[in-house]
Amino acid sequence: MVTVYEFDGSARIHRLRSYYDKLAIEEQIAASLPGIKGWLLRKVTRVLLAQGRTGLETPTGPPPTGVS
């Protein structure tokens, strides 16, 4: 979970927002479910996690050169 505080000019909290990692929560729930329902939810959660991570891996080579 991440909580974001926005302050106004007088240093008072203007807005407060919280963001949750919904897939991580769903994965924890799936891990606790028995039987076919838990198995199916774990499979779906793993697919969603894999799709969400696509493109997030950092390259292992040197950074590209000549990029403007």
Image: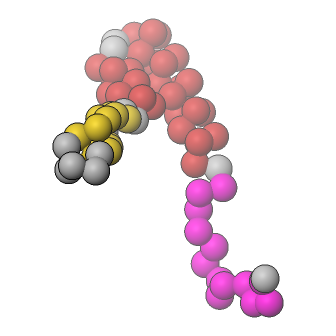
Percent from the top left, x then y, of residue 34? 34, 12
In the depicted structure, whether residue 61 falls above or below residue 52: below
Q: Position of residue 41 (x, y in %)?
A: 48, 18
Residue occupying image coordinates x 39% and y 10%? 35
Rendering quarter of residue 37: top left
> Image check: 63 left or right of 13?
right
Asked if 61 appears above or below 6 in the picture, the reply is: below
**Residue 46 percent across, percent down from the top left:** 53, 34
Label the magenta part by its dominant secondary structure: loop
17, 14: nearer the viewer: 14
Q: Nearer the viewer, residue 16 or 39?
A: 16
Report the number of numbered marks. 0
Span highlighted in magenta in the image: 55-67
Q: Residue at x 59, y 33 (%)?
A: 47
Res 68 visible = yes
What is the quadrant of residue 62 in the picture? bottom right
